[in-house]
Image (tube, coloured by chain):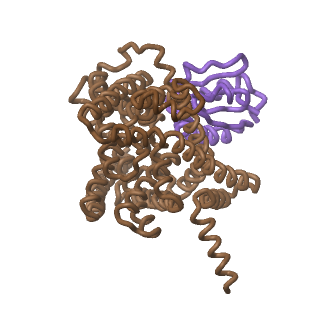
């Protein structure tokens, strides 16, 4: 009996609570359920584990490279510097949760199950979209698990259940909200956005008609060709980080940087630091890609088997092909907004300094630009993207002041608006979570009613045809 | 075997979805294939093991390939009706032996 117990104990404490092994097992079960051949099961399982370990190494390298600089910033100027980037946010969550990070794995699975349930009962819930962007699902579930864990001090089961419900509601409701605008934008392509700014895109589609003219599209605006360098994520990350960390290190002064640099010349050290960010990012992205490639395939398989008619919500880059010019235009306006935001933060003497990452700067503003352009032309797009850039910076500073994750924050539009609002509520009282559920029920009641009316009308028109 | 590479900005989201959609399509059309996905910044290093690169139109214009390899630009990454005919054209003209 004791023998069986000790096996269970080892399984629990050494395997099921360690994220890489847990996810390896999930992939294995998924592949076996999909009746894949033995070699695929084994290779997929190993790649999931190796990918996650690579991600962990990249994250710890990122911390060891940049924490000394952020610490120096704090001691010299009394500023809390935070990188806003989904992967930096993921790193900060992993660092803050330690071994409890395995809970995030369970949260993702539970939230996906709930999202699928919502779609199964879409005539009641009104929700027809299912989130299937694996890399993002981990980043977001991690943030929500951390918020519940840190503000309510809950154990594993309660954290997974509460964070899972919050995550699933965010996925289900926001991807559903943005489905109709995406359909209009893509001419009925049959998918929705499942990224980090669905609320932002929905908002842009509603506000844009008042700020511009739909007929004056961005396509009429000439874009400079050198901007194409930002298509390359490695080059773009290195450039953006060289600018921000270069400025911070210059502000720290030659003496401090020389001390950090060791035998390297201080100017070369600044350059190397910018490049180093791209190194860490490449490691993290490669690691995430390895385990997510396996998981996304099995998520897709599960979703198609359980809910065949579900609308998939995918990465925002899926709409970039519909308005390539608006992508660049939105990015440029958003970047100007973010830079002005950072300058304003310094000017007003905020204790929080936001260091914008390339991903929020590019992907967020680009997709918001695509929506704004479609519904209000370039006049609406520049206003909205400039605004979204400012919001990303100020909203993230708001979130950082509440979240207790000081090195990194997700920083994408929804995580600079609705998520800090939720955090603020949670800080005031845990009742916020009840209010959130009540709000979700109201949304579902209305969406369900609309969906039933739509489906019945469709049926009726088929019957008469 | 025809080797297809799906490319997107970060190599994380849409290229993965495109890869899965193309997998289903190529299988249905009985084409002997191998699929991969990567970021725009990596396509040059992945090109050695690819015959056709498929990417969103906003990136496809900036992808250059040596002779014998092909680029297909797609507007809707999730629609067979969009990438399907374009991909089949290239395959039938250049890789006819892989159609079973």
Side of B75 relative to A125 (left or right): right
Which image quarter is the C terminus of chain A in? top left
The answer to which of A332 and A253 lies nearer the viewer is A253
Instruction: Determine which quarter of the picture holds residue A31.
Output: bottom right
**Residue B65 visible in image:** yes
Q: Residue at x 68, y 41 (%)?
A: B27
In the rendered image, the vertical position of residue A380 relative to residue A446, given as above or below: above
Q: Residue at x 34, y 31 (%)?
A: A338
Side of A115 relative to A301 (left or right): left
Could you tell me how many numbered marks the image carries? Answer: 0
Q: Residue at x 30, y 29 (%)?
A: A343
User: What color was chain A assigned in the picture?
Assistant: brown
Side of A91 relative to B35 (left or right): left
The answer to which of A107 and A296 lies nearer the viewer is A107
Which image quarter is the N terminus of chain A in? bottom right
**Residue B74 visible in image:** no
Q: Residue furthest left?
A: A210
Instruction: Determine which quarter of the picture holds residue A77.
Output: top left
Q: Residue furthest right?
A: B97
Q: Position of residue A416 (x, y in %)?
A: 33, 43
Q: Position of residue A286 (x, y in %)?
A: 61, 41
Q: Residue at x 57, y 33 (%)?
A: A262
Q: Position of residue B2 (x, y in %)?
A: 73, 31
User: What color was chain B assigned in the picture?
Assistant: purple
In the rendered image, the vertical position of residue A283 relative to residue A137, given as above or below: above
């Amino acid at each position: 009996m004791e023998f069986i117990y000790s096996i269970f104990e080892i399984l629990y404490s050494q395997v099921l609570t360690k994220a890489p092994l847990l996810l390896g097992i999930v992939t294995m079960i998924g592949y076996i359920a999909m009746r894949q051949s033995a070699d695929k099961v084994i290779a997929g399982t190993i790649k999931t584990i190796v990918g996650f370990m690579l991600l962990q190494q990249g994250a710890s390298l990122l911390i060891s490279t940049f924490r000394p600089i952020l610490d120096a910033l704090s001691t010299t100027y009394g500023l809390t510097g935070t990188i806003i980037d989904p992967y930096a946010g993921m790193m900060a969550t992993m660092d803050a949760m330690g071994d409890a990070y395995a809970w995030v794995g369970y949260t993702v699975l539970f939230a996906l199950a709930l999202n699928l349930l919502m779609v199964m009962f879409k005539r009641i819930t009104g929700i027809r979209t299912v989130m299937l962007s694996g890399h993002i699902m981990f980043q977001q579930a991690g943030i929500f698990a951390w918020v519940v864990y840190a503000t309510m001090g809950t154990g594993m089961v309660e954290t997974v259940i509460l964070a899972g419900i919050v995550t699933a509601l965010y996925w289900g409701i926001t991807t559903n909200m943005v489905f109709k605008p995406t359909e209009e934008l893509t001419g009925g392509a049959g998918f929705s956005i499942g990224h980090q700014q669905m609320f932002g895109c929905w908002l842009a589609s509603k506000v844009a008609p008042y700020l511009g003219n739909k007929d004056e599209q961005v396509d009429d605006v000439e874009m400079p060709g050198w901007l194409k360098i930002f298509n390359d994520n490695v080059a773009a990350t290195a450039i953006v980080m060289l600018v921000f960390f270069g400025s911070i290190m210059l502000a720290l002064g030659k003496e401090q940087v020389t001390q950090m640099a060791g035998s390297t010349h201080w100017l070369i050290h600044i350059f190397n630091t910018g490049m180093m960010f791209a190194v860490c990012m490449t490691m993290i992205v490669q690691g995430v890609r390895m385990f997510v490639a396996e998981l996304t395939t099995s998520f897709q398989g599960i979703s198609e088997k359980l809910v065949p008619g579900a609308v998939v919500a995918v990465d925002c880059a899926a709409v970039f092909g519909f308005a390539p010019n608006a992508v660049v235009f939105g990015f440029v306006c958003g970047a100007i907004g973010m830079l002005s935001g950072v300058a304003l933060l310094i000017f007003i003497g905020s204790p929080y300094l936001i260091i914008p990452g390339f991903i929020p700067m590019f992907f967020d503003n680009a997709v918001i630009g695509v929506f704004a352009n479609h519904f209000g032309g370039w006049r609406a797009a520049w206003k909205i993207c400039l605004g979204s850039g400012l919001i990303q910076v100020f909203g993230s500073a708001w979130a950082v002041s509440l979240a207790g994750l000081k090195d990194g924050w997700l920083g994408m539009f929804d995580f600079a608006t609705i998520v800090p609002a939720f955090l603020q509520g949670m800080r005031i009282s845990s009742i916020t979570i009840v209010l959130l559920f009540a709000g979700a029920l109201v949304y579902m009641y209305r969406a369900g009613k609309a969906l039933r009316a739509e489906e019945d009308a469709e049926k009726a028109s088929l019957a008469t045809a | 075997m025809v080797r297809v590479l799906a490319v997107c900005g970060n190599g994380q989201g849409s290229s993965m979805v495109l890869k899965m959609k193309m997998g289903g399509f190529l299988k249905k059309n009985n084409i002997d294939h191998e699929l991969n996905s990567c970021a725009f910044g990596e396509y040059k290093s992945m090109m050695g093991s690819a015959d056709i690169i498929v990417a969103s139109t906003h990136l496809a214009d900036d992808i250059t390939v040596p002779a014998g390899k092909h680029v297909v630009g797609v507007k809707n990454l999730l629609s067979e009706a969009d990438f399907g005919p374009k991909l089949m054209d290239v395959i039938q003209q250049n890789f006819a032996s892989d159609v079973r």
